[in-house]
Image (cartoon, grey):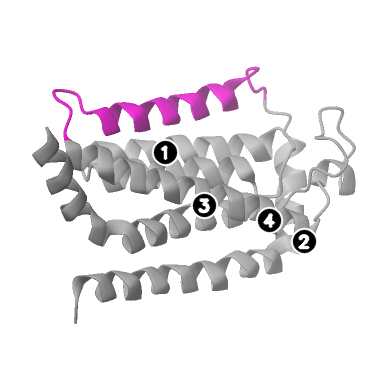
């Protein structure tokens, strides 16, 4: 069996996991709603723009890991591009799901909050969670160093903040996290057989 076929099979497994787990998150809406109300009613003070700052920090970390801390390497850049394609694909799928499911925001459905996103900006899955966990997964793909796990802590913080500020149900964040991880890995696995030939080509040109 060729390496490309093995990678495709592995990618198929990750896609199947996403296909099962992302819709399954919707089954948790009842429990998720109760948890949402409990968290929001705690009225946890959240610094302004903290979510955006963490997201920008994650994206910057992805760029630094892709660029390399000591020297630019063709293979690292190629892997980063492939992971980046996975991140973009995860985000686009998140937007597509929102269009079809049109789940109302909890800040209109369960509580009336002033800072609720505009009508028509649907809730499931969380785009922030999708992107954050996709970027964290991209960082892990580029470098398997244990410090890369810190990216997942940042992603978790972003997801938690989206709940605490009232913008999302917990199951929105869970669905987004699963989508971001699974799609990023699946796309990378599909493209990974190209890594070696592309690296040789760019190295030869260099």
Of all residues, the one furthest to the top in this rendering is: 48
Pick whichever of labels 4 and 3 is earlier in the sequence: 3
Residue indicated by mark 3: 89
How crowded is the residue under tag 1: few (<14 C-alpha within 10 Å), some, or many (20+)?
A: some
Q: Nearer the observer, disc 3 or disc 1?
A: 3
Label 4 vs label 1: CA separation? 27 Å
Label 3 vs label 1: CA separation? 22 Å
Look at the image and tell me in which quarter the N terminus lies: bottom left
Secondary structure under the numbered disc 4 in the rendered image: helix
Dividing the picture into quarters, in which one does residue 98 lie? bottom right
Dividing the picture into quarters, in which one does residue 111 lie? top right
Residue indicated by mark 4: 96
Span of residues in magenta:
45-73
Label 4 vs label 3: CA separation? 10 Å
Labelled pair 4, 3 in contact (Cβ < 8 Å) = no
Residue indicated by mark 1: 153
Q: Nearer the observer, disc 3 or disc 2?
A: 3
Label 3 vs label 2: CA separation? 18 Å
Secondary structure under the numbered disc 3 in the rendered image: helix
Look at the image and tell me in which quarter the C terminus lies: top left
């Amino acid at each position: 069996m060729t390496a490309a076929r093995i990678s495709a099979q592995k990618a198929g497994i990750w896609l199947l996991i996403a296909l099962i787990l992302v819709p399954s998150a919707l089954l948790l809406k009842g429990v998720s709603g109760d948890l949402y109300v409990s968290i929001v009613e705690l009225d946890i003070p959240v610094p302004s723009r903290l979510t955006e700052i963490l997201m920008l920090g994650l994206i910057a970390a992805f760029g630094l890991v892709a660029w390399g801390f000591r020297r630019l390497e063709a293979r690292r850049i190629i892997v980063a591009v492939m992971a980046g394609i996975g991140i973009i694909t995860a985000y686009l799928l998140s937007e597509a799901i929102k269009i079809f499911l049109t789940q109302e925001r909890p800040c209109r459905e369960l509580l009336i909050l002033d800072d609720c996103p505009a009508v028509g900006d649907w809730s499931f899955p969380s785009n922030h969670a999708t992107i954050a966990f996709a970027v964290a997964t991209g960082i892990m793909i580029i470098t398997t160093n244990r410090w890369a796990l810190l990216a997942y802590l940042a992603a978790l913080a972003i997801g938690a903040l989206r709940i605490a500020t009232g913008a999302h149900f917990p199951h929105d964040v869970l669905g987004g996290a699963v989508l971001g991880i699974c799609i990023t890995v699946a796309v990378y696995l599909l493209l990974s057989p190209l890594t070696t030939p592309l690296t040789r080509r760019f190295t030869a040109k260099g």
